Amino acid sequence: MESILRQNNLSLLRDIDRLRHLLQERSRLLPQEWQSYCKWTQDKCEAIHRKVNQNLRDLDYGQPNLLPDILSQTQAVTRTFFQLARQASPVLRGSDIDRAALRVLLWTHMSHSRTKDIPMAVSNEDFSIWPVIPTMYLLPCTVQHSLLYMPLFFHEFGHLLYALHHMEMDELVKSLQEKIAEILTPMSHLDDSMAADVAQEQQIVVERWYEWTQELFCDAVGLTIGGSSFVRAFSMYLRMRGRDHFFVPKQDLELQSHPVTWLRIRILAACLRAMSLKEMADEIERQWEQIAGTMKVKEDYFGFYSEDFLEPVQATLSDMLTEAGPVGLDSPVSTTPGVNGYSNPVPVLMEAWDYFLTSPADYEEWEKKALSDILLNTN
């Protein structure tokens, strides 16, 4: 057993040294926006290196009674290393191209007291997030150079806020689930053999709203921070993704972690109207209705949503936003100043959509200048 453990620890030490060297080389080449995340990965690498060396020193004692503990430590540090290898991947692929996205995210993090010290990075996949410390934001490489879809990061930031306020958020979601159950209960007062089946279906609906509310909260965070830029980015990015963004069969809804996108548009529109932005709400709803009509898709959520849900859903989202406190909640985000040398990107993101929709032929040239200004602006 001792030889097995020694082999694994020596092999792991070699891998750590290789990763440590790669991180040192890359950190010297990356711009300042990467430095906080680079430092975190390098510090983590050093900590793992120390643990492996400790395992090897413990093996040198030659005490059989220590082997079970050394085995446990070796397994733990191996898992930690492979986790770090994935967390380090953004650094190894990072470049100057990432700077605009990083500056948007750094301003977002630094504008909130709970996230200002959390290291973060970007990497390439479809939009998503690792809402842990450090935080990794994923975005498609095809939109990495475009201002138009950067507001979608604000939705992902919502997942981080939820994680940081997990207990309080879960309580609010649980309260909403209870209200939805109350709305559904009168329909279950049946005197026939179907009552049990109906009750079971209603319980499935209630349970599904645990995950759905989290996604709707993140949409609300996106709207709170990004305003019109988020709504337009969200709608444009998803409306051509296919029929399943408009309609999902009942049996699939039971396992769906996200609400149907058309329903998310409906609730975003309701939030816009609550913000006195009726014209934009009508516009995005009309666009989705036109696409659905062309596909001959009829809106149907099979009891997983009804208009009776809207008021408690909106009230819950409002309470969740109050708990999380994203920038833009108490005053227009367009008036929010820069933080620690990172300028507020939201006015530029809003302007990007206005320019794209009114002057699409000239947008590319405008965006090049706007991106350059973001990288230079330190207000």
Image (cartoon, rainbow, N blue to C red):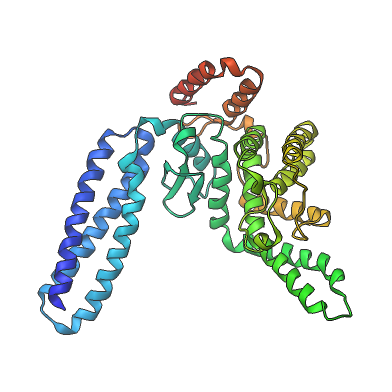
Q: Residue furthest bottom?
A: 65
Give the mark count.
0
Q: Quadrant of the N terminus?
A: bottom left
Classify residue 172 by image quadrant: bottom right
Residue 273 position in % (x across, y down): 79, 39
Which of the pair 338/309 is nearer the observer?
309
- Residue 117 at least partly seen: no
Residue 149 vs 117, above or below: the answer is: above
Residue 197 position in % (x across, y down): 77, 76
Which of the pair 120/237 is nearer the observer?
237
Please state if 226 lies on the left or on the right of 278 as rendered: left
Residue 62 position in % (x across, y down): 10, 79
Please state if 197 lies on the left or on the right of 226 as rendered: right
Image point (67%, 63%), residue name:
251
Please state if 62 lies on the left or on the right of 199 as rendered: left
Residue 266 position in % (x across, y down): 75, 45
